[in-house]
Image: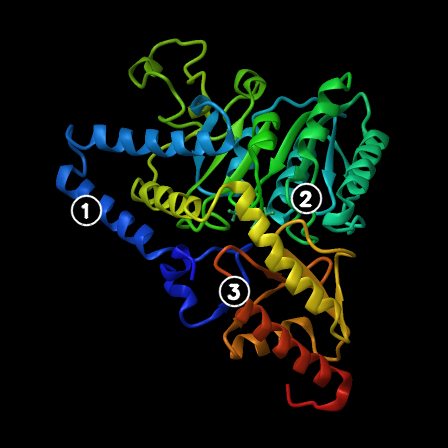
């Protein structure tokens, strides 16, 4: 059993396939959070003795994240979740009436809503990049990449200011060629900004190149990193740091609190702290660091994704070989997200409920309506076999042979 798995109390009573929603918290991460909370009470909570401790916690966490993403610490802002990381920098960019935003048709509702509202307020136009129809799987990655670049080339205009796309699509499970997209955008005359939703890529696939080339690369600790909810980060490019204004402004955004009362043309930090706001939950930092360090004991980023791919391939093959089930991807997945649909009289929501009664947890996606099961380092073959055997029973019953489900 993996060292990580033995620490996940959430897995002791269930077969868990919802890592893309939230990862379970290792016991030692919970202990690290509690210990940090105790330390803050011993030193503070609001004393001169506690400030160096808090500063050290923040620095250690930012350094770890910067290292993980292959960027300098000055480009890392701590956030609460993926969405705030995307939005805080996005809304700080300056847009003029009539400029255009390209957004993929596989983005999460929160980011879509923010782009739509931004477009409404600033009179921008939105163009949709179709990536949802590309469902080829890992064997045909280069075909997928070529098609995405061609489609993007076809949609960009001189007025395109921004491209929004996820690194790893939360619904189809395909990986987007972020480095190629970034390279292409840099060569494009209007040099649009590139915002990448990294909710599903951080701590699942190697991200150094993508994180260091995108303009806004936002993620959370509470999914594939096994961190606590309420703590994420965003990596910002130099040009975003130089040209964007902070969206939500607070004492953390400014370089000298005292001087804010005097005239100061630019009171903000020159680094990513410009996009941080105010008081946040310090103990979570120790929890996230502990989780990432634990994950790293399971191998390098390349070794880990290879393990994940073996598991997702097994699940994908078994699903493919089940009558009444259709996998979303034509070939084995490039990472740990395996989506599928069931040709069944039983609704997807009811299927999830039925699985839940047997302590098997997957989720329904809304648009398109698909079922999604995620596998990660702690997943074992026994769990996959169990999921498959119950899905086969449901598939059989869904043909109308048995209506007791
Ligand atoms: C691709 C993607 N983006 C954004 C989010 C929202 O994450 P958060 O609640 O951390 O903002 C999710 C959550 O499932 C997601 O899958």
Which mark's residue is nearer the viewer, 1 or 3?
3
User: Residue 404 at x, y = what percent?
Assistant: 65, 90
User: Where does label 1 land, which residue?
Assistant: 38
User: Dot 2 lies on which element?
Assistant: loop
Residue that appears at 49% across and 41% down:
300
Q: Earlier in the sequence, mark 1 or mark 3?
A: 1
User: Dot 1 lies on which element?
Assistant: helix
Find residue 348 and name its label.
none
Tell me if mark 2 has few (under 14), some (14-19) or many (20+) residues whose alpha carbon lies within 10 angstroms of its own.
many
Location of residue 261 (image quadrant): top left
Task: Give me the C-alpha separation between circle 2 and circle 3.
Answer: 23 Å
Residue that appears at 44% across and 34% down:
65
Residue that appears at 32% across and 13% down:
259
* Contact flag, marks 1 and 3 (Cβ < 8 Å): no
User: Where does label 3 land, which residue?
Assistant: 380
* Contact flag, marks 1 and 2 (Cβ < 8 Å): no
User: Residue 378 at x, y = what percent?
Assistant: 48, 59
Q: Is residue 25 left or right of residue 48?
A: right
User: Where does label 2 land, which residue?
Assistant: 175
Task: Answer yes or no: is residue 388 visible.
Answer: yes
Q: Is residue 22 left or right of residue 136?
A: left
């Amino acid at each position: 059993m993996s060292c990580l798995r033995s620490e996940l109390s959430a897995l002791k009573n269930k077969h868990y396939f919802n890592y893309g929603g939230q990862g379970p918290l290792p016991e030692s991460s919970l202990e690290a959070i509690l210990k940090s909370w105790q330390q803050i009470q011993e030193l503070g909570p609001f004393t001169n003795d506690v400030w160096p401790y808090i500063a050290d916690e923040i620095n250690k966490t930012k350094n770890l994240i910067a290292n993980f993403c292959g960027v300098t610490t000055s480009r890392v802002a701590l956030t609460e979740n993926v969405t705030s990381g995307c939005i805080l920098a996005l809304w700080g960019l300056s847009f003029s009436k009539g400029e255009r935003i390209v957004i993929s048709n596989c983005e999460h509702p929160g980011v879509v809503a923010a782009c739509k509202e931004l477009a409404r307020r600033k009179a921008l136009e939105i163009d949709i990049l179709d990536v949802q129809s590309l469902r080829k799987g890992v064997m045909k990655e280069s075909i997928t990449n070529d098609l995405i670049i061609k489609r993007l080339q076809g949609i960009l205009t001189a007025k395109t200011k921004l491209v929004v796309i996820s690194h790893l699509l939360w619904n189809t499970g395909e990986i987007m060629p972020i480095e190629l997209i970034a390279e292409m955008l840099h060569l494009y005359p209007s040099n649009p900004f590139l915002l990448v939703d990294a909710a599903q890529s951080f701590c699942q696939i190697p991200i150094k190149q993508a994180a260091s080339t995108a303009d806004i690369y936002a993620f959370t600790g509470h999914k594939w990193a096994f961190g606590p909810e309420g703590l994420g980060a965003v990596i910002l490019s130099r040009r975003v740091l130089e040209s964007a204004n902070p969206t939500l402004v607070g004492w953390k955004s400014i370089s000298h609190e005292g001087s804010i009362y005097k005239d100061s043309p630019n009171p903000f930090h020159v680094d990513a702290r410009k996009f941080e706001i105010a008081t946040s939950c310090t103990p979570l930092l120790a929890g996230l660091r502990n989780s990432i360090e634990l994950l790293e004991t399971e191998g390098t980023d390349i070794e880990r994704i290879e393990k994940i791919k073996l598991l997702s391939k097994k699940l994908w093959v078994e699903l493919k070989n089940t009558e009444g089930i259709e996998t979303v991807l034509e070939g084995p997945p490039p990472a740990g997200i395996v989506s599928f649909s069931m040709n069944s009289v039983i609704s997807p929501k009811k299927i999830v409920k039925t699985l839940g009664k047997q302590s098997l947890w997957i989720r329904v996606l809304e648009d398109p309506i698909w079922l999604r099961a995620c596998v990660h380092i702690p997943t074992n073959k026994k769990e996959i076999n169990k999921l498959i055997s119950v899905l086969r029973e449901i598939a059989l019953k869904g043909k109308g042979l048995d209506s007791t489900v």
